[in-house]
Image (cartoon, rainbow, N blue to C red):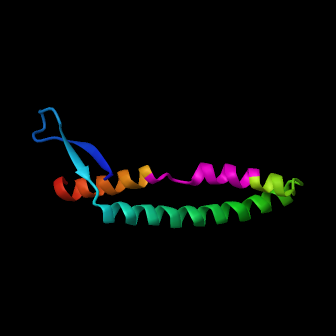
Amino acid sequence: MTFTKSFPRKITPNSAPVWEEIKLTQEEERHVEEECKRINFLILDESLREAKSLAIKNGLNTEENQVKLAIALFEKRASHQVFWKENKAKEKFDQKYG
């Protein structure tokens, strides 16, 4: 199923916006998903390293604490695929109408 997102576009300054639907191609969607995975892998790796450092620094250095800290850091930082797809759709919208 292709990802779609609608964006408001003003035709004249005083008119109500017209909603334009932007669809990602399968290739665009696949590319965004792969980029998201790559970035999330890097974020998780960084989160694991920082969690270990935090656990050692704060005297909480057990594997369980490291994992809990890493998950908390990752969840705080990680972007979801839908967010990335929405950004790609917005980029296409801006290129078409901006």
Q: How many callouts does the rendering have? A: 0
- What is the chief secondary structure element of the magenta stretch? helix
Query: Residue at 79% across / 62% down in the picture?
Result: 53
Residue 13 in the image: above or below residue 77: above
Whether 27 is among the magenta residues is no
Residue 19 in the image: above or below residue 4: above
Range covered by the magenta-colored residues: 68-81
Query: Residue at 51% across / 63% down in the picture?
Result: 37
Instruction: Give percent across and percent down for residue 96.
Output: 18, 57
Residue 51 in the image: above or below residue 14: below
Left or right of 66, for residue 76: left
Instruction: Give percent across and percent down for residue 35.
Output: 45, 66
Instruction: Give percent across and percent down for residue 44.
Output: 63, 61
Query: Residue at 61% across / 49% down in the picture?
Result: 75
Q: Nearer the viewer, residue 27 or 22?
A: 27
Left or right of 44, for residue 98: left
Splitting the image into 4 quarters, where does residue 66 fall? bottom right
Whether 69 is among the magenta residues is yes
Query: Residue at 87% across / 57% down in the picture?
Result: 61
Left or right of 5, for residue 61: right
Q: Nearer the viewer, residue 88 or 59?
A: 88
Which residue is the extreme one toward the right? 59
Image quadrant for the C terminus?
Answer: bottom left
Instruction: Give percent across and percent down for residue 41.
Output: 58, 65
